[in-house]
C-alpha cells in the first residue's frame, strides 16, 4: 500500500514538474519574442528616427537606452507614485514600484501616499 501511495505521489510530482517546465518555456518564449519584436520595431525606422524606447503593440513598454540613476529610482523607488507597475528603465516590460507594493501589502505605511 505504501508503495502505491509513493508511486502515485511520484507520478503527480513528475506531472507538476513537467507542467511547470512547459509554463517556463512559454514565459521564456514570450520574453524573447517581446525583445525581438521591440528590436524589430526600432530597426525598421530610419536611423535618425530611432529612439530605442516606446511601446510594443501599443501596450508593452520597452527601453533600450542606457538607464540613468533617476530613471532607475522612478521605476523601482517612487513613494509619491500610486502606480504599482512602472515602465522598466531598461529592457521590455514592467518593473515593480517597491514603496507602493509595501504600502499595499500593509507592511510599510510611512511612505508618502499619492501624488
Image (cartoon, rainbow, N blue to C red):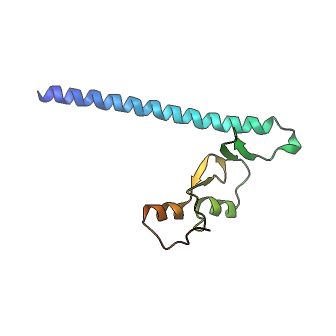
- Residue at coordinates 57% horizontally, 32% vertically from top-left? 29
- Residue at coordinates 30% horizontally, 32% vertically from top-left? 13
Q: Is residue 66 left or right of residue 76?
A: right
Q: Quadrant of the N terminus?
A: top left
Q: Position of residue 28 (x, y in %)?
A: 55, 35
Q: Is residue 32 left or right of residue 98?
A: right
Give the mark count.
0
Q: Is residue 65 left or right of residue 31?
A: right
Q: Is residue 21 left or right of residue 86?
A: left
Q: Position of residue 86 (x, y in %)?
A: 61, 54
Q: Position of residue 67 (x, y in %)?
A: 70, 56
Q: Quadrant of residue 48?
A: top right
Q: Quadrant of residue 15?
A: top left
Q: Position of residue 20 (x, y in %)?
A: 41, 34
In the foreground, 101 or 18: 101
Say above or below: 60 vs 81.
above
- Residue at coordinates 65% horizontally, 47% vertically from top-left? 91
Q: Quadrant of residue 34?
A: top right
Which residue of the protein is positioned furthest toward the front in this rendering? 114
Say above or below: 57 vs 53.
above
Q: Quadrant of the C terminus?
A: bottom right
- Residue at coordinates 17% horizontally, 29% vertically from top-left? 5
Say above or below: 1 vs 56.
above
Say above or below: 71 vs 80.
above
Amino acid at each position: 500500500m505504501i508503495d502505491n501511495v509513493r508511486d502515485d505521489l511520484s507520478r503527480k510530482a513528475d506531472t507538476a514538474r513537467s507542467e511547470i517546465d512547459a509554463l517556463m518555456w512559454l514565459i521564456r518564449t514570450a520574453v524573447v519574442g517581446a525583445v525581438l519584436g521591440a528590436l524589430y520595431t526600432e530597426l525598421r525606422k530610419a536611423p535618425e528616427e530611432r529612439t530605442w524606447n516606446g511601446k510594443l503593440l501599443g501596450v508593452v513598454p520597452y527601453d533600450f537606452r542606457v538607464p540613468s540613476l533617476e530613471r532607475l529610482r522612478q521605476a523601482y523607488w517612487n513613494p509619491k507614485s500610486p502606480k504599482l507597475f512602472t515602465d522598466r528603465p531598461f529592457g521590455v516590460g514592467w518593473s515593480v514600484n517597491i514603496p507602493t507594493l509595501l504600502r499595499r501589502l500593509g507592511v510599510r505605511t510611512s511612505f508618502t501616499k499619492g501624488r
